[in-house]
Image (cartoon, coloured by chain):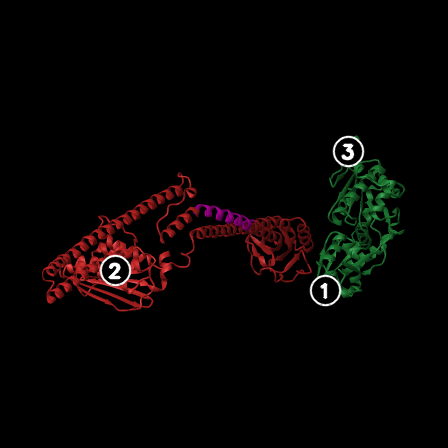
């Protein structure tokens, strides 16, 4: 899985409303741009229409005076027409003759009779209904040829002040901007609120799922359950069903664990009885010998020695039983003697199977960790290794402490760990449910190590079977581990 | 008494502008046809209404006011007998002296006289006609005394003609238009009726304010009211003459005179226009 980017880490309850807000703003901007663009086009068309209409009206009045070359008449027409139109105000109109010299203009001081067309007018362009707009100067220029019988007798040049139209556009722009900004803000807030409400159930679900990482999956409380008609309601109920199933599974596993423990105890009791029974025969023999030949010092010494060894054997078995009961004292810290207890408990199994046990505790310095779970886990792994190795097999046990990590290695000469076993120990599903009760010991190891926030590694052992390594961080201490 | 607009509108039913030939009006009376040249402030429709109303009331006949763009058009109508009388300029009067007779001459500032003004843009520092050489010059009408002949005669005395002396001459067919042409910068200088210029200074100071008077001419006979020589003594002509000569005695008439800034109309001898005739001869002599 690729690592999550900073954006992916943002909660969905923030991400979605922000996305909605950004979309709202984008829609506002695009809509405003389209409206303004449309307005600009419409205004250019309007300018064209008005100026052309204006020039059309003038042209017919100007033909006669231009033909006569009558400056006064031309001026009079231009001067009076200037005061007529209001939509587009002509700033200046000039009529030139066929040679391009001014016949008369509405502002004779600027365009004197007989002079060249002032430079402000687009030179040499007879736009023929094309309007040249210079927005920066609020000007529009248009030319119209005066044609009689197919011959151009002069040209009418007009400059219009389009500042009113541009001011209208600016006005629309600001109105649009402020209205859109206000609406977008309102929609952003409403959108944010609505989407926040919509994704809120997701947050509840996410919180519960998140919490399940550190413990049992807890169902969502009834007061937080939306109506079953809603999508969230159905989802929550499905989640609760799943949480219930998981809880039952965990309970089942715990029960199986207890049963296994009892079974172990039974096996232990049986083994203990067997171990006590063996020397008992010898002891009774020794007592009989003492009764009959107690007066002989050699026989007496041999018999007492035999009785002593038999009692030593019984004491070992009793100590092992005591070690098992000591498991109840949960808060006790791990000690090297715990591993000695494990060895003691394992002894009967090893001997029964005539196995070879290689035992090494490589450090006297042991971190302060809960003793019981580690001892339990080590015992389970060893019992498992003993069972896997079979008659005459080899088992290796090693404890290392390389600060701050405590490593416990168990190797065997068996056929190796089954894939199911590896999954139980190292799979991402913390509490893989066993289908047939097998692997319960491994499952308990996994739970114990998880409780200690430790890690389990499974590999191939040099002995031919499985190598299982528990790695537990000793810096966590007892309190934290217990709390976990 | 001021002439009320409402009263004038009531009279408009019998006042027809520029419709020829003569029309018989209600009641069988024949309309009196009176022509007006741009010597007057013809753009002032109120004034025309007042004048028509007064003439109608004074003559006892319907009045038909006839206006035309040029002096020549009105003079032609008058000489050809299509008008009973017309307010023309002294120059057409001496041009058609044999065919026209004087009915009355306006009295302005106690005299039957007026001047021609040479005007220029206010910003120019000019005092003589010589400084106007090479200008675009605005004249009123080729048949106007003050708006053409006076300046042409002055140039003729210098041995030159307007189209040679000036770079370009333009005719605006109205004294007010001469002032507009100079004020706007279309023409650098112009020849204008001094009476019209002075009245304009009073009623439209923003227009004349952009111009300055370069020089005032000698005094000439004020543009007269003339009638065709053939119609002298006719009832129409006489009623028109009476209406004019008694205008200052009538309330409506005084309102018209006031609007025109005139004192009255008086009978004057044709010799009043001899200086104009002399100028005409001078200009014609130059060819």
Mark 2, Cα crowd under 10 Å, few <14 / some 14-19 / many 20+, is many
Q: Chain A rendered in what hue?
A: red
User: Magenta residues, as a range?
Assistant: A179-199
Q: Is residue A81 left or right of residue A2?
A: right
Q: Quadrant of residue A312?
A: bottom left
Residue B113 appears at what percent x and percent y? 86, 53
Q: Is residue A197 left or right of residue A404?
A: right
User: Which residue is pictured at 36% across the width and 45% down the height?
Assistant: A239
Residue B2 appears at what percent x and percent y? 84, 41
Q: In the rendered view, tell whether residue B200 sits above or below residue B26.
A: below
Quadrant of image for the C terminus of chain B? bottom right
Disc 2 and disc 3: Cα gap in Å?
A: 141 Å
Mark 1, Cα crowd under 10 Å, few <14 / some 14-19 / many 20+, is some
Which residue in the protein does label 3 denote?
Answer: B25
Give the label, 2 or 3, closer to the camera: 2
Disc 3 and disc 1: Cα gap in Å?
A: 53 Å
Which of the marked residues, 3 or 1, is nearer the chain's N terminus? 3
Do discs 1 and 2 share a chain? no
Which residue in the protein does label 1 denote?
Answer: B134
Which residue in the protein does label 2 denote?
Answer: A378
Of all chains, the one bearing label 1 is: B
Q: Is residue B227 left or right of residue A303?
A: right
| Residue A416 shown in magenta | no
Spot the residue most to the top. Answer: B27
- Main SS of the magenta part reads helix
Mark 3, Cα crowd under 10 Å, few <14 / some 14-19 / many 20+, is some
Of all chains, the one bearing label 3 is: B
Q: Chain B rendered in what hue?
A: green
Viewer-side residue, A15 vs A125 = A15
Give the label, 1 or 2, closer to the camera: 2
Do tag 2 and tag 3 residues touch (Cβ < 8 Å)?
no
């Amino acid at each position: 899985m690729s690592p999550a980017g900073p954006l992916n880490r943002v909660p969905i309850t923030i991400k979605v409303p922000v996305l909605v807000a950004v979309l709202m703003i984008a829609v506002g901007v695009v809509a405003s741009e389209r409206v303004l663009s449309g307005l600009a086009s419409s205004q250019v068309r309007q300018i064209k229409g008005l100026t052309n209409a204006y020039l059309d009206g003038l042209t017919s009045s100007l033909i006669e005076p231009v033909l006569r070359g009558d400056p006064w008449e031309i001026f009079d027409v231009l001067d009076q027409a200037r005061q007529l139109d209001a939509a587009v105000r002509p700033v200046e109109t000039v009529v030139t003759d066929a040679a391009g010299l001014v016949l008369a203009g509405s502002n004779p001081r600027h365009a004197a009779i007989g002079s060249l067309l002032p430079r402000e007018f687009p030179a040499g362009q007879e736009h023929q209904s094309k309007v040249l707009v210079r927005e920066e100067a609020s000007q529009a220029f248009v030319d119209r040829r005066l044609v009689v019988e197919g011959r151009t007798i002069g040209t009418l040049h007009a400059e219009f002040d389009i500042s009113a139209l541009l001011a209208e556009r600016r006005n629309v722009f600001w109105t649009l901007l402020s209205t859109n900004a206000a609406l977008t803000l309102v929609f952003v807030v409403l959108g944010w609120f609505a989407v926040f409400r919509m994704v809120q159930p997701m947050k509840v679900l996410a919180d519960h799922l998140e919490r399940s990482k550190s413990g049992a999956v807890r169902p969502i409380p009834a007061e937080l359950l939306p109506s079953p008609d809603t999508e969230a309601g159905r989802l929550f109920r499905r989640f609760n069903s799943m949480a219930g199933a998981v809880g039952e599974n965990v309970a089942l596993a715990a029960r199986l664990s207890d049963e296994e423990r009892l079974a172990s105890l039974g096996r232990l009791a049986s083994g203990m009885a067997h171990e006590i029974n063996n020397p008992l025969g010898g002891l009774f023999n020794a007592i009989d010998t003492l009764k009959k030949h107690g007066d002989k010092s050699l026989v007496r010494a041999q018999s007492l020695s035999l009785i002593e060894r038999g009692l030593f054997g019984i004491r070992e078995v009793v100590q092992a039983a005591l070690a098992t009961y000591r498991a109840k004292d949960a808060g006790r810290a791990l000690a090297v003697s715990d591993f000695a207890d494990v060895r003691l408990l394992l002894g009967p199994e090893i001997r029964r199977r005539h196995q070879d046990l290689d035992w090494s505790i490589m450090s006297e310095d042991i971190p302060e960790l809960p003793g019981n779970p580690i001892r339990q886990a080590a015992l389970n792994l060893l019992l498992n290794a003993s069972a896997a190795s079979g008659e005459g097999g080899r088992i290796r046990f090693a404890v290392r402490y390389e600060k701050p990590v405590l490593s416990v290695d168990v190797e065997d000469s068996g056929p190796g760990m089954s894939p199911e076993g590896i999954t139980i120990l190292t799979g991402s599903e913390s509490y893989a449910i066993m289908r047939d009760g097998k692997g319960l010991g491994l499952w308990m190891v996994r739970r114990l190590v998880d409780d200690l926030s430790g890690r389990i590694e499974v590999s191939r052992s040099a002995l031919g079977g499985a190598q299982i390594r528990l790695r537990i961080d000793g810096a966590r201490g007892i309190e934290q581990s217990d709390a976990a | 008494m001021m002439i009320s607009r409402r009263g004038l509108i009531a009279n408009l039913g019998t006042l027809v502008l520029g419709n020829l030939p003569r029309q018989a009006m209600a009641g069988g009376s024949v309309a009196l046809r009176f022509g007006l040249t741009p010597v007057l402030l013809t753009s002032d429709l109120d004034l025309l209404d007042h004048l028509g109303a007064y003439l109608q009331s004074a003559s006892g006949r319907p009045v038909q006011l006839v206006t035309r763009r040029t002096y020549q058009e009105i003079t032609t109508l008058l000489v050809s007998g299509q008008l009973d009388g017309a307010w023309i300029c002294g120059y057409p009067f001496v041009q058609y002296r044999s065919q026209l007779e004087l009915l009355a001459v306006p009295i302005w500032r106690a005299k039957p006289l007026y001047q021609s003004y040479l005007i220029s843009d206010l910003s120019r520092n000019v005092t003589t006609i010589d400084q106007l050489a090479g200008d675009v010059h605005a004249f009123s009408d080729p048949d106007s005394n003050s708006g053409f002949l006076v300046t042409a005669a002055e140039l003729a005395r210098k041995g030159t003609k307007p189209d040679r002396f000036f770079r370009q001459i333009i005719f605006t067919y109205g004294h007010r238009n001469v002032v507009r042409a100079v004020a706007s910068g279309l023409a650098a200088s112009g020849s204008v009726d001094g009476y019209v210029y002075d009245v304009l200074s009073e009623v439209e100071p923003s227009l004349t304010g952009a111009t300055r008077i370069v020089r005032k001419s000698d005094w000439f006979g004020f543009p007269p009211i003339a009638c065709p020589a053939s119609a002298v003594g006719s009832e129409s002509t006489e009623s028109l003459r009476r209406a004019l000569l008694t205008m200052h005695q009538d309330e409506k008439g005084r309102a018209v005179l006031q609007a025109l800034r005139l004192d009255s109309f008086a009978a004057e001898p044709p010799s009043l226009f001899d200086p104009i005739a002399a100028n005409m001869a001078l200009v014609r002599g130059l060819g």
